[in-house]
Image (cartoon, rainbow, N blue to C red):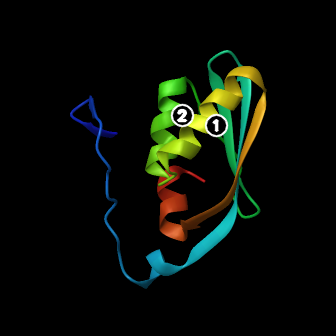
């Protein structure tokens, strides 16, 4: 899904790639904690810069999509967070620029 003028569209967004910095990938895991019925804290480990608060399930879905996580893993995370307070997405690889753009 891509956000275009406030409208969600179901298609794959291809982020713009930059110079060599985009090729520097960090591997880790994305840790998500549901703090109440509709608020989520997201952190990437081991190299994240703290946590990122997301206020709705749809916003969490968009955040994970922007992080280039496959749709099946996003659906798995959302389903798990409906019944458990925490979920981890393992073996995640993000570029340093992508981490900055996501606020991690």
Q: Position of residue 12 (x, y in %)?
A: 32, 49
Residue at which label 2 appears: 60
Q: Position of residue 48 (x, y in %)?
A: 69, 58
Looking at the rendered image, the disc whose residue lies closer to the viewer, 2 or 1, is 1
Q: Quadrant of the N terminus?
A: top left
Say above or below: 11 vs 17: above
Within the image, what quadrant is residue 46 found in?
bottom right
Q: Relative to residue 46, is residue 26 drawn left or right?
A: left
Can residue 49 be seen? no
Within the image, what quadrant is residue 7 found in?
top left
Badge 1 element:
helix
- Please report the residue visible at 32 percent of the width from the left and 51 percent of the height from the top: 13
- Please report the residue visible at 34 percent of the width from the left and 60 percent of the height from the top: 15
Query: Could you tell me how far apart the alpha carbons at marks 2 and 1 are, in whole angstroms?
Result: 10 Å
Disc ID at residue 77: 1
Can residue 83 be seen? yes
Please rate how many residues cluster around mark 2, counting C-alpha atoms within 10 Å: few if below 14, some from 14 to 19, many from 20. Answer: many
Q: Position of residue 93 (x, y in %)?
A: 59, 66
Within the image, what quadrant is residue 35 found in?
top right
- Please report the residue visible at 66 percent of the width from the left and 41 percent of the height from the top: 42
Query: Among all residues in the image, which is located at the extreme left?
Result: 5
Disc ID at residue 25: none
- Please report the residue visible at 31 percent of the width from the left and 65 percent of the height from the top: 16
Q: Relative to residue 4, is residue 79 drawn left or right?
A: right
Q: Relative to residue 20, is residue 38 drawn left or right?
A: right
Query: Among all residues in the image, which is located at the extreme top?
Result: 37
Badge 2 element:
helix
Please rate how many residues cluster around mark 1, counting C-alpha atoms within 10 Å: few if below 14, some from 14 to 19, many from 20. Answer: many
Q: Position of residue 89 (x, y in %)?
A: 68, 49
Q: Quadrant of the C terminus?
A: bottom right
């Amino acid at each position: 899904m891509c956000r275009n003028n406030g409208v969600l569209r179901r298609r794959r967004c291809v982020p713009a790639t930059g110079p060599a910095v985009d090729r520097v990938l960090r591997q880790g895991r994305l840790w998500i904690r549901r703090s109440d019925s509709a608020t989520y804290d997201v952190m990437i480990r081991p190299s994240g810069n703290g946590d990122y608060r997301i206020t709705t399930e749809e916003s969490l879905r968009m955040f994970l999509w922007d992080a280039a996580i496959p749709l099946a893993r996003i659906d798995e995370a959302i389903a798990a967070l409906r019944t458990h307070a925490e979920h981890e997405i393992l073996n995640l690889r993000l570029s340093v620029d992508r981490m900055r753009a996501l606020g991690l």
